[in-house]
Amino acid sequence: MSSNLLLPEETSSQTLRRRIMAIAGTVILVATYITLITTQPMGIVEGLGQGVALGTFAAYLVAAILLLLAVLSDLPVSTLTLIPVALVLNIILGQFVGSVMIPLYIDSIGTVIVGFLAGRRAGAATGVLSTLVWSLFAPTVLPFAAGAALVGFLAGTAARFGALRRIYLAPIAGVIAGVLVGVVSSPVATFVYGGTSGVGTGALVAAFSSMGDSLLSAVTKQALISDPGDKAVVFLVAAILVYALPKRLSGSFAFVRRYSVLGKRVSK
Amino acid sequence: MSRTISLHPFTILAVAVAVITVTTAASQWWLSCTVIGLCLLISGWAGDLKKLAVLSGAMLLPTFLSLLLIHGLISRDPAPAIAQWGPMRITVHGLEVALSLGLRTAVLVVVGLLCGLLIDKHQLVAAIDLSPVPPQLGYLLAATLFLLPQMGEKQHQIGEAQQLRKVGIGRGIIGWFQRVRLRAVPLVLASMQDAQDRAVHLSARGFPASGPRTRLRTVPDSSVQRGIRWAALVCAVLGPVLILAITLVGSQ
Amino acid sequence: MDRKLSEQSTAVLGMDLHSFTYLDNHAAVLHDIQLDVHPGSLTVIAGHSGSGKSTIGAILAGLLPRHGMDELIGSIKVDETQIEFSSSSTPRIDVAQWAKHVGLLPQDSGHYLSGIRGTVAEELAFCLENAGMPREQMLQRVNDLAQKLYLEHLLERHPQQLSGGQERLVALASLAMSEPDVLVLDEPLAGLDKRATQVVSAMIDLLRANGTALVVLVDSVGIWAEDADDLWRLNQGTLHRVSAAELLQRTAPSLHHRPVAIDAQILLELDTVQLSYPGSSGPAVRNVNLQLRAGECLGLAGANGSGKTTVLKAIAGLLKPNAGTLTLSGESGLLLQNSSDQLFERTVLREVSFGIPKKSSGRDRVPEVLAQLGLESYAQTHPYELPASARRLVALATVLIHEPQILLLDEPTEALDEAGEAVLQEVIASVLDRGGAVALSTHDETFMNRVTRRVIQIGQS
């Protein structure tokens, strides 16, 4: 039997390099976050403020790209073709849904769908890529790549532990994801942009700030109000979309079968 | 008429990064304004002035308003206020902070958007493919850029088809939900099925490549451009460091 | 096994399939199939939509079974290599290597294109690029192939702006790029107009003349019958050898046209109507005049982009005319060209009854409509798990459930197999019988001649 028509069984030759990149990305992210939280650099425009802004921007972006490179070559082709669809869904559904419900951003439905169907690595990759592509149209989103990666990662984790087996579990998982994402993303909003980019969210930050909060805690509180709600809606909508898929399609994802993501819904 | 620059996409990106980091680090209003003005001039030359102005305006206006709210109107600066009304407290310093942060974002937005307008998407994909990053990256970028208009069109068609079904749509939250479902579910179903169908043929055509890969499309490059790229990247890193060091020394 | 190999030694591709079962299905889709493909031969496999012919194609091309999902028991021989599949072991196939021997043109040829290249030349070179061929050599190969297949005029075109026929040509050429021994073509001529059919079949002849063996999967044997070396019918999951005469069915009977009474009610009248899309500079169609009486079936003809669809959309109320008058008496219902994209419910039954109040007379009609379209057995199936033809009929059912007086059909035969076309013809007849009217656009001339009494040209001043 000539073997050139068959693939060798999977090898683990390059996994070490990828694992190092994943660890490096996570370490950079965590280290930057902890540094910012503990030192709380004063003054966002004077003195070292500009340096903090650039440093935060760069660290969050580099961490996200490392995480992306770590998972990219592992993804099967069926996931690769799914990701662009998810990126476009992020944009199109975001516009459609967002045009009705103003206070939320709803820009991660596609990312969450990928997380649900293809697992947390694919979800994280989708989050980063979504940000990179979107930055061609809106450059300010770049440093939020790490937050977007976290959304996809958490969606995959939630699906793995059964958040899709009952419809009411999806928004609950969304709230938890929203809290984490809000906390991780606030330093970017604070130290890079000095606040938020929306008028509604800006008003919230101003209100907290006038009550005596530091800028970081005001932005974080604002994020803790907006993000969980936003992610709850996103997780719920994404779950409903996944339920609507034919069994033949959803069942073709190894992740869905392995962790019985949809529970009994599949056998219907 | 639009003109395009025949520079290597990475050259444009590297210069843009250098300009953004140096301008941000310097944080001088005149420098930021000059950079923004230059960008507008370049876009005027390329025939994209209106597009750039509208896009960046749409993004910057809410940002400026938000920053004004946070820093300008509710300043916690000890300096005497120019105006005070209830919790609102306006100080010169607060307004300066808001303006300075606004300009910082403005430079990023305008330079970034100009890059997006100047770079030919096909050339960018080819350049990424020819660089040593994993082959998946170029595919994902290209596929997304191609899919965006296609799925927009499909979304429009689905809207028409659903309109024809004469489905009574309720009001309020249930009606809204129903509308989202009618539009979103067919779009997701059709596009995900499509993605699934394409995947097997992509792998049949040898994607992703396991070994080295080539491109039929050429991306013009030159040693001068390579030099510029390296210089720009060095500037992007060392520029801010130098500027910040000088500021620190100056302030002590 | 040695004896078998020597028997098949002349075949470039051999399949000895005991059974094939999709993931999560209990019943085998295919069973007991032996097929040998010899160099330069033409094998034709006929079967209706959903018979499993695309599954055979995908197995021959190494795309099925998916590793760890589907189950194939049997063996496939490609290029002197025999690969055994059993229920306990599914080898992981290197599809890229397999594609160098057997290429598959899918039913929707656009799926074969990468969708990420800016010109046809780059699309043709895609597999060479992935193999890392030096650019000069690649350019040479692309130009040689384009010259051989008369494609030079398309090389600089954008792959997504090609017509249906051109897209198929480009997909075929991309397949031919890796010079496979066997090409499996799934419905290579479906949905093409007369000219495109000629061009595409010319290229297929050319490929065969160059020594490529062809396996053609079709719904109706039609023009393939004469040339075929091997003719099979796929029925109940297995292949039966047949003769050309058996497969060349008599043509479907024409619609029995009852004369339309001269005083029949005018249901629809367009008088010097001009239509344009919002945001576009010029009108899409101008000066359209037509009358449609009860009991009449009218055909709209015209080249691609002449505005047939636009006129149908205007009648259905999606577009308001910006000049002229459009009068309509009675409800209209339009089946759009890509109507199966609008489906969103989890079962056919829910899809068809969507938006119809419970306990209304409409609800009672749901089973009736499903029966009329032969969809009863699919009531509990997800629309996306149906064969393409049945899915199109589901979309038609969502239109018919509202009992439109004026039934509008945009390219209704697209995706329909022969049985589906027969059902469609009955539907048209029943609408006319109950005093309704039908207007349709189609590039399928035989169908047009069969069902319409009167054809008007759109887009010709």
Image (spheres, helix red, strand yellow):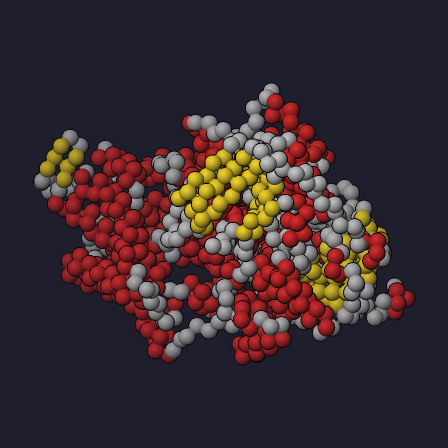
* Residue occupying the point 68% across, 47% down: C450
Query: Is residue C347 visible from the viewing direction of this image?
Result: no
Along the viewing direction, whichever of C53 and A85 lies nearer the viewer? C53
Q: Position of residue A9 (x, y in %)?
A: 68, 60
Q: Position of residue C258 (x, y in %)?
A: 68, 38
Give the quarter of the image for residue B68.
top left
Side of A47 where A58 appears, left or right: right
The relative height of residue C284 versus residue C372 in the rendered view (above or below) is below
* Residue occupying the point 10% across, 39% down: B81
Side of C400 where A177 appears, left or right: left
Give the quarter of the image for residue C382.
top right
Along the viewing direction, whichever of C389 and B234 lies nearer the viewer? C389
* Residue occupying the point 42% across, 55% down: A133
Side of A8 where C244 appears, left or right: right
The relative height of residue B215 versus residue C436 in the rendered view (above or below) is below
- Check the picture and name the quadrant holding the N terminus of chain C: bottom right
- Most distant residue in the front direction: C262
The relative height of residue C254 versus residue C58 in the rendered view (above or below) is above
Q: Position of residue A110 (x, y in %)?
A: 49, 45
- Most distant residue in the top direction: C359
Query: Is residue B235 visible from the viewing direction of this image?
Result: yes
